[in-house]
Image (cartoon, helix red, strand yellow):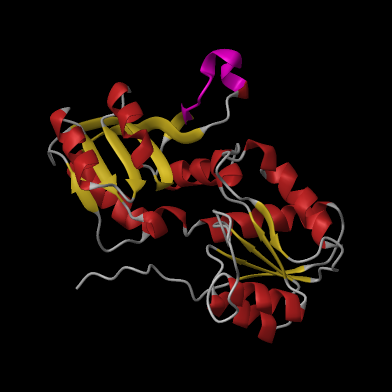
Amino acid sequence: MKTKDILELLNIIAPFDIAEDWDNSGLQAGNLDWEVKKIMIALDVSMPLMTAAKKAKFDLVLTHHPLMIRPEKSFHFNKMPGSAIEVAAKHGISIISAHTNLDKANDGLNDCFATKIGLENTKVFFIENPSSVSEDEMIGMGRIGYLKSQATLKQVVNQIKEKLGLSHLRVTGDMDLPVNCVAICTGSGGSLVEEFLKSEAEVYITGDIKYHEARRVEEYSKALIDVGHFGSENMVVDLLFDKLGQAIQKVGLNIQIEKFKKEKDPFIIV
């Protein structure tokens, strides 16, 4: 199996053509014809990841976040992203990222997040042109769904902390607010705050919320739960491990897949 074959399998799991226009999913560095026998999966492309892949002789690293989003004018091999590209080139390691295509895909990251926190009857939260497709064909950002039973915001917060294994959250809203409907968006979901305010959801769960976005939610007497960017997406490693592993097994190949286990949230609470 070659790098291009892994891309084809990933395209079935999360089609690259549904990625956002600004995104850079797909091959980040490497060679489509390089042979792949060992794959390491991570959230971010980092030097610790590339160093681990080099030492253990991995042929490909698969991440959620791209190595680059904006075009680079030059690459310096003593700093990212150039340092990762240098390792990839010298040691024959392809780098692939599945970003917003995996966020949006059916059974992708947002569906995984919704299931993990216990939402039911979920559907796509935001789609740019909803009138052009049927509800069954909708592919878009975030999800909106319902709790199994009504709970207060405080109860929802405690459940989220337990289910995601988080020691802290940022919360906006009345802790006694009754909650039935919940909207979510993994990663940085601030751009969908206005969609949330127009929706039936009482609570919006996402990461990287800004001060003025929180104030807008206060004005509507709704609630926000900011689980952090890392907290909303680190489960992607397990998701990709399972999805890609199943796809490789289905085509009858024996490829070693491992999870990079040394990632942690860059923020600490002091």
What's the magenta region? 124-136
Q: Is residue 193 left or right of residue 110?
A: left
Whole-percent x and y of residue 45?
56, 67
The picture quadrant where one finds residue 266 is bottom left
Q: Residue at x 60, y 36 (%)?
A: 106
Quadrant where the N terminus is found in the figure? bottom right
User: Does the image show residue 108?
Assistant: no
**In the image, residue 74 above or below residue 127:** below
Q: Residue at x 18, y 43 (%)?
A: 172
Q: Is residue 183 left or right of residue 260?
A: left
Q: Is residue 190 magenta?
A: no
**In the image, residue 46 above or below residue 131:** below
- Depth check: give the residue in front, 65 or 147: 65
The picture quadrant where one finds residue 119 is top left
User: Does the image show residue 175?
Assistant: yes
- Depth check: give the residue in front, 148 or 182: 182
Whole-percent x and y of residue 73?
58, 62
**In the image, residue 147 above or below residue 77:** above
